[in-house]
Image: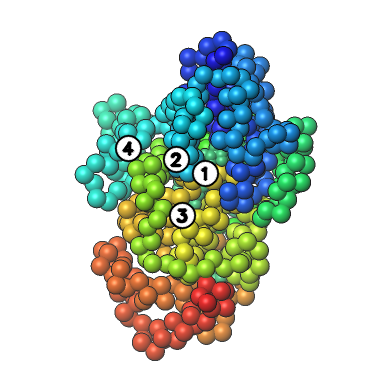
Amino acid sequence: MGALRLVLGDQLDPGLSALDAWAPGDVVLMAEVAAEATYVPHHPKKIAFVLSAMRHHAAALAAAGFAVDHVRLDDPGNSGSLRGEVARAVRRHGAHRVIATEPGEWRLAADMAGWAERLGVPVEVRPDRRFLCSQEEFARWAEGRRQFRMEHFYRTMRRRTGLLMTPTGEPEGGTWNFDADNRKPLPRDAAAPEPLRFAPDRETWAVLALVSRRFGSHFGDAEPFWFAVTRGDAERVFAHFLATALPRFGDHQDAMRAGAPTLFHSVCSLYLNVGLLDPLAMCRAVEAEWRAGRAPINAAEGFIRQIIGWREYMRGVYWLGMPDYAASNALEAEGRLPALYWTGDTDLRCLAECIGQTRREAYAHHIQRLMVTGNFALLLGVEPRAVEEWYLAVYADAFEWVELPNTHGMALFADGGRLASKPYAASGRYIDRMSDYCGACRYDPGRAEGEGACPFNFLYWDFLARQRARLAGNPRMAMPYRNLDRLAPGRLATMRRQAADFRRRLGVEP
Ligand code: FAD
Ligand code: DLZ
Ligand code: SF4
């Protein structure tokens, strides 16, 4: 009779708080359950990644001396839910209490709050130390601020961690943020490195067969499967990134290229989010590359900002605001999500590239998510919940604490500016500048009306006109509204008609 220590599929860290003060007789429970794969229809590659990484972590914990009870998806009697598996394990082991680490999604935290009563044993939920800023610290930082700005939070985190700081407390390089140096398009002939890939081992092949049998109808290809599924291999991925991509990460952070999904990105978010990599250790390693002269400051600062800035900020906004945060809909977007998000069937080449790549790899980098698929949904006025479900389902790194603020706040502006100072709405010209997608597209990014006009263009002007009452007063939107007002009224009316037809054809409007 001991404690049952719950380790979830995104808590694969041997230093997890749920394992603190281990005592003889305690048992770790890890449970593969159908409900976690289907509450949204997760991409098969993501499910295979999580399940295989869970199995490898369970083996590593057992080898380190922990008693581990790992319930497999196809074990007879598997109840299909986390609550059901915890209840069965409490009975199986005669556990007198349950110890967990706070989960990454509000829905599970809310469910856990009722576990003690249902199970008849105390349930202790401990803080998650894998983040640099606790929920309480973020709440203190947020106190008294009506609007949050990542930049202010980021500076606090730089000072606290000492990352890229001089001995006298100034930012290295003389400025806090090199964002302006992170927007260079990629020259046509520039070579980009490939991320490190791994062949599946026997356990991963078994998981792939299981996933194909149980979840093969979900959007996405499980194979070829090349993700790391152990801590050691995830560390190799990161070391490979440092050696091959970090030096140019800064310059081309916002660039997109057809057929090159990862460019100079790390493809580490999935490993970080399930606990196979440690955020602070990664940032220290990146800083060391800069100090050794192997990476420029705009690359090191840009990467560190994503991790101690954006990543922690998103988590803070999520936990502070939930569940109300998810319910907001500041732009009153009520449209339906076009089927093309799930089929990839579209002649808009930028969308076809990003969605096709997402289907194959369960991966897209930030600008693809924000400025192509996210921007399109924003301009169309799609209902936030449907967009969020898509992002949560299709990316291997998607867990609601980070997916929701990125989608709801950053991409859709559905929080009315709590998280970002303006909507990231852009026309086809932006996509043309930052990618090579438009060259082979049937639409022309230089045209905004008539046959062959890029839909992002007429949708952009239609969006601004439609949202004038809500957005025109925002100082950061002054320039777009000045440009809108310069359009001849007849031209704007034509574009708005074209936008309305387009939205109807896509099924956004009934
Ligand atoms: P890199 O470009 O190499 O960046 C390094 C690391 O910084 C990433 O691994 C990630 O941990 C962190 N990071 C970068 N940008 C962000 C950000 N905006 N928020 C939080 N962390 C960031 N990221 C997720 O981890 N899970 C999600 O579900 C998710 N959903 C998103 C949805 C939308 C609509 C948008 C616009 C962004 C979303 N992001 C999400 C953020 C970002 O797109 C991914 O973190 C990034 O693309 C992962 O690829 P990478 O590891 O190659 O990143
Ligand atoms: C994403 C996922 C999947 C697909 N499967 C499981 C699972 O079988 N067992 C488990 O413990 N966790 C899984 N996860 C991760 C959970 O969805 C995640 O822990 C919660 O969403 C909280 O972040
Ligand atoms: Fe996308 Fe427009 Fe460029 Fe085509 S022309 S790829 S639709 S931005």
Tell whether label 1 touches label 3 (CB within 8 Å): no
- Is the residue marked 3 within 8 Å of ligand 1, measured from its CB? yes
User: What residue is shown with label 1?
Assistant: 399
On screen, 262 above or below 229?
Answer: below
Answer yes or no: disc 2 within 8 Å of ligand 2: no
Label 4 to label 3: alpha-carbon separation = 20 Å
Q: Amino acid at mark 2?
A: Ala
Closer to us: 117 or 305: 117
Task: Give whichever of discs 4 and 3 has the lower sequence position.
Answer: 4
x 52%, y 37%: residue: 273
Q: Earlier in the sequence, mark 4 or mark 2?
A: 2
Query: What residue would you read off at disc 3?
Result: 407
The residue under label 2 is 110
- Gap between marks 1 and 4 measured at Cα: 19 Å
The label nearer to you, 3 versus 2, is 2
- Which residue in the protein does label 4 denote? 138
Please state, as top left, top right, bottom left or bottom right, where the N terminus lies in the image.
top right
Q: Earlier in the sequence, mark 3 or mark 2?
A: 2
Disc 3 crowd, CA 10 A, few/some/many (<14, 14-19, 20+): many
Distance from the alpha carbon under mark 3 to that under mark 1: 12 Å
Question: Counting residues from the N terminus, which is met first, the one under dot 2 or under dot 1?
Answer: 2
Q: Residue shown at 41%/86% (left/top)?
A: 493
For label 2, count other residues whose C-alpha is less than 10 Å away and answer few (under 14), some (14-19) or many (20+): few
